[in-house]
Image (spheres, rainbow, N blue to C red):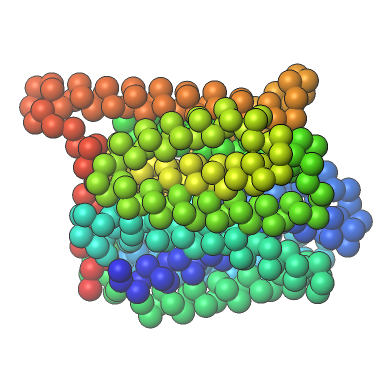
Amino acid sequence: MPLALLALAVGAFGIGTTEFVMMGLLPNVADDLHISIPTAGHLVSAYALGVVIGAPLLAAVTAKLPRRRVLVGLMALFVVGNAVSAAAPDYHWLMAARFLSGLPHGAFFGVGAVVATGLVGPERKARSVSLMFLGLTVANVVGVPVATLMGQQLGWRATFLAVSAIGLAAIAALALLVPADHGHGENAGLRGELRALGSLPVWLALGTTVAGFGALFAAYSYVTPMLTDSAGFAEASVTLLLALFGVGATAGNLLGGRLADHSLRGTLFGGLGALVLVLLLFPVLMRAEWSAAVGVALLGMAAFTTGSPLQLMVMEKAAAAPSLASSANQAAFNLANAGGAWIGGLALAAGFGVTSPAVAGAGLAVFGIGVAAVAYAVDRGRAAGPGGSGRLVAEHVPSVPADATRP
């Protein structure tokens, strides 16, 4: 695999670390800034809002720029956001800094996915995307626990300084390892970008992402009370168990990338089906410590098996403007985070029990399979219609313009 994928993975590692570390640092931030923990929780929402707004916006306005320059610029914005977070004098400054840190998140992964697929042959596109996302999953295993421990020992500001340093390392790696662009990115222009994003197949692909990963976050958002109240773990053990989730997510990400290179659609349906099964089994798995640990790892594995297929499917449906569609898919992931947590919370508030968010998540995953099935039917209809080839393009790994990423 090209070394440029390592540079993308380093950037993904830094982004994944800063996205999730705030959850572990909320008590420290709240105490230092003299605010309540619920108020500090709004800092998580500020980052997510930055992702949702920044992903399509930054991808659209940079569509005609050389992609290596775009990636370096996005990572520079990431460094500035985290540096300002470290120096924030009060809560309002930190809120603004977290929003700023989230702005480049989606566009980096979106443009990075286009670059990654342009660096390899058509038979390895899904694996190239999974290797970029490897930085994100490894961040959950190593980056977040280490950064949380650093924040607890040295203060939360030290954590954001360290993340800024990771961002600087990523900038250097991107500048050195990503091939120089010949020409620019897509030539569709902003109007063409928006037109490509507005097609029904693109929205069905994005809907599959929201439903599929909403299923994950419906359960994962409340996994701590499941582990302590149902499985009987001590609170001190939860961090290690969440690292198991990261291990499962890493394995699922690599497996999904490999399988999707053989069958994109089959991997997507298989991953969503596995997610339904794991979530339905969660109430049983959470009855004992050993099975709960296995369940957490399986949850990460099943969910992230679908990551690369979902990313590639969205890019395929907007082949004329893959950067914007790919970035929009990152916004969809964050909408799934918020929506899934809300639906899981509804199940808890209704009094269905501590493991009920997992069952609600299974319902979302079933809905995701339904949306993917509709997308499949639309593809069949278009392939069989006038001028259709009779073949389903979605059964193959998408062909994304790569001339701007090859040396």
In what quadrant of the picture does the N terminus appear? bottom left
Residue 264, located in which quarter of the rendered image?
A: top left
Tell me residue 283's x, y (percent).
66, 29
Residue at 73% of width from left, 20% of height from top? Answer: 352
Taking 94 as reference, is 314 left or right?
left
**In front of the other: 10 or 65:** 10
Q: From where the camera sits, is residue 79 visible?
A: yes
Point 23% across, 27% down: residue: 379
Q: Residue at x 64, y 41 (%)?
A: 291
Q: Position of residue 62 (x, y in %)?
A: 39, 57
Q: Quadrant of residue 206?
A: top left
Q: Is residue 300 left or right of residue 5?
A: right
Question: Percent x, y for residue 24?
Answer: 75, 56
Image quarter of the C terminus: bottom left
Q: Which residue is at 90% across, 58% downward?
A: 31
**Residue 401 in the figure: left or right of residue 49:** left
Number of marks: 0
Q: In the drawing, does residue 153 fall left or right of residue 217?
A: right
Query: Of 19 and 284, which appears nearest the observer?
Result: 284
In this view of the protein, which residue sits in the foreground, 47 or 159? 159
Where is residue 312? Give x, y as percent. 33, 46
Q: Is residue 60 visible?
A: no
